[in-house]
Image: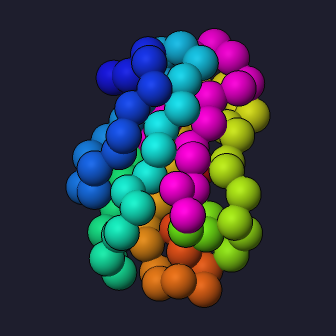
Amino acid sequence: VISTNTNAQAFYTYVFTATATLTLPASPEVGQWIKVSNMSGTLTPVVAANGNNIMGASSDLTIDALNAGFEMVYSGATKGWVLIGN
């Protein structure tokens, strides 16, 4: 459970309870995963890409859906972190 800016570690689950930024690992390995859930009551928590792609884009991900939850799996440099489920 996080309510302040946090550096993510692979194989952990993070639940936002306030607006904050979760920064993804800078040097992930293929197959590593992170689970995320937005229970903050806001539409502004951010998952920071930290130099890697998220779904093929180099931009950060703003979780603009309430109560959204998903898994991110690192797939390599081209697609980067791929979202699975919601």
Q: Main secondary structure of the magenta part?
A: loop
Locate residue 19, reporting x and y percent: 59, 18
Quadrant where the image shows the N terminus: top left
Q: Is residue 71 visible?
A: no
Locate residue 9, reporting x and y percent: 28, 50
Q: Is residue 38 magenta?
A: yes
Q: Of 57 and 64, which appears nearest the observer?
A: 57
Query: Residues in magenta?
Result: 36-51
- Quadrant of the rendered image containing residue 46: top right
- Quadrant of the rendered image containing residue 40: top right
Residue visible at 53% across and 83% down?
A: 77
Depicted 26 relative to depicted 3: above or below: below
Depicted 47 relative to depicted 80: above or below: above
Q: Is residue 79 visible?
A: yes
Q: Is residue 69 magenta?
A: no
Residue visible at 57% across and 47% down?
A: 48
Q: Of 59 and 71, which appears nearest the observer?
A: 59
Locate residue 76, reporting x and y percent: 47, 84
Residue visible at 63% across and 13% down?
A: 41
